[in-house]
Image (spheres, rainbow, N blue to C red):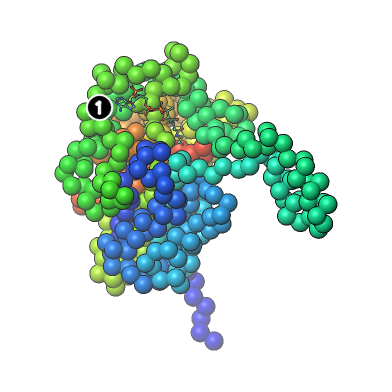
Amino acid sequence: MPPKKTPAVRKVAIIGGNRIPFARSNGPYAKASNQDMLTAAIDGLVSRFSLQGEVIGEVAAGAVLKHSKDFNLARESVLGSKLSPATPASDIQMACGTGLQAIITVANKIALGQIDSAIAGGVDTTSDAPLAVNEDLRQILIQLNSAKTVGDRLRLIAKIRPGHIVPAIPRNAEPRTGLSMGEHAALTAKVWEISREAQDELAASSHQKLAAAYDRGFFDDLVTPFLKLARDQNLRPDSTAEKLAKLKPAFGGPDGTMTAGNSTPLTDGASTVLLATDEWAKAHKLPVLAYLTFSQTAAVDYVHGDEGLLMAPAYAVPRMLARAGLSLQDFDFYEIHEAFASQVLATLKAWEDPAFAKEKLDLDAPLGAIDRAKLNVNGSSLAAGHPFAATGGRIVATLAKLLHEKGSGRGLISICAAGGQGVTAILEK
Ligand SMILES: CC(=O)SCCNC(=O)CCNC(=O)[C@H](O)C(C)(C)COP(=O)(O)OP(=O)(O)OC[C@H]1O[C@@H](n2cnc3c(N)ncnc32)[C@H](O)[C@@H]1OP(=O)(O)O
């Protein structure tokens, strides 16, 4: 018998990414479904990397808001794309961490020698949010479906009341607290004393940096026009902290510091990333932008404890750094998802705080400050928008290309997610 092969850990290369421009909710993509957008994002990769008819090792993707008809959205999107139908695909859901979690999932399979290539991604549309029928009506309809006699059917139909027509609309809120993401973030902003001025400055700079990156052609091979949109619709290149200062509070009451300008807007969009082994890239004559080398998830008890809903990355990053043997300052780029400006600033403040280090992270010293010039250098979610599950793919593709342009170095990714979770990763050239 030949000796049994033990799997070796292999390097996971990021070949490239693709996304459709992100659109504001109920805007140009109002009539596009999750499947339409995810298929478009996959086909953008297919065209760019000549993958027509290719059998990819596996596709993993997801949506936070998903219709019940989309049992396996990733698989349906593959079947609608120009990839070979022999490409297996599955859905993943980890709220705003979905895209990055999908990337990590397939990256681990590549590392373990289970597949040689993969596409990971995410999509979301708040324009096409799934509406459920009223719970009482749902029960009647289910019983009606299996009623055997006309009499049974009529008895059930007679139970339907006008009030049953009111649908159950999904809320952008935590099921266990009833508070929206914005309301949760406003609580955290208060605890960490994040000023309105600092939030508006971060938001304005996100717009200015994203606009500059578009202008210099950075996104030419990362973004494919869709439904006549060529750039992210939310982008306002003329944003300034002074203009943002005039907006009224959106969360945290009349004295709140969070506004429509320093919070992400509700957004529609999709993104994908192509990952592979070095050998697969070579065989397909494709360049490698960067490697995914470490990842980490964490969760916090925001229901019973005193933790902020979006603070899990503050825990995930130090754990990942310990595994990697790196300090927070050992990075050339920091990509911190801007769910809200206040949440980025609270996370940075936590890493600088001796009490947080001691009491929460069990560390002798805080992680320390980062060089702010290295933070979200091409803008982030405040400017681009945030179609929940699509943000991970946008960030990984952006960072991989930044590292490729630089020709060396290392980048940190930190994404907070609803449910009190965080997903983080390290990319290296
Ligand atoms: C883990 C996570 O990622 S959690 C994050 C999940 N995401 C969310 O929770 C989404 C949060 N965001 C929201 O719910 C909504 O976008 C809100 C409530 C903040 C704002 O919604 P709306 O009021 O519909 O925003 P709208 O786009 O109309 O903007 C309000 C005003 O601000 C203005 N504005 C918004 N951004 C800017 C800007 N960058 N510069 C100048 N003005 C701006 C708009 O022009 C508008 O002005 P107007 O009233 O004169 O027309």
Task: Relative to 400, say whether 366 is above or below.
Answer: above
Q: Quadrant of the N terminus?
A: bottom right
Residue at 52 percent across and 29 percent down: it is 180
Residue at 34 percent across and 26 percent down: it is 261
Q: Is residue 224 visible?
A: yes
> 167 or 428: which is nearer to us?
167
**Mark 1: C-beta under 8 Å from nearest atom of ligand 1:** yes
The answer to which image quadrant residue 379 occupies is top left
In the image, residue 230 lies at what x, y percent? 25, 46
> 427 or 255: which is nearer to us?
255
In the image, residue 126 lies at what x, y percent? 46, 40
Circle count: 1
Ligand 1 image position (quadrant): top left
Label 1 secondary element:
loop
> Is residue 288 shown left or right of residue 426?
left
The answer to which image quadrant residue 277 occupies is bottom left
Residue at 51 percent across and 53 percent down: it is 92
**Extreme residue toward the left, this view:** 216
In the image, residue 385 lies at what x, y percent? 36, 38
Task: Relative to 355, say whether 130 is above or below.
Answer: below
Amino acid under disc 1: Ser
Residue at 77 percent across and 42 percent down: it is 158
**Residue annotated with mark 1:** 239
The answer to which image quadrant residue 321 occupies is top left
**Extreme residue toward the top, this view:** 255
Q: Is residue 188 visible?
A: no
> 135 or 426: which is nearer to us?
135
Task: Relative to 34, say whether 59 is above or below.
Answer: below
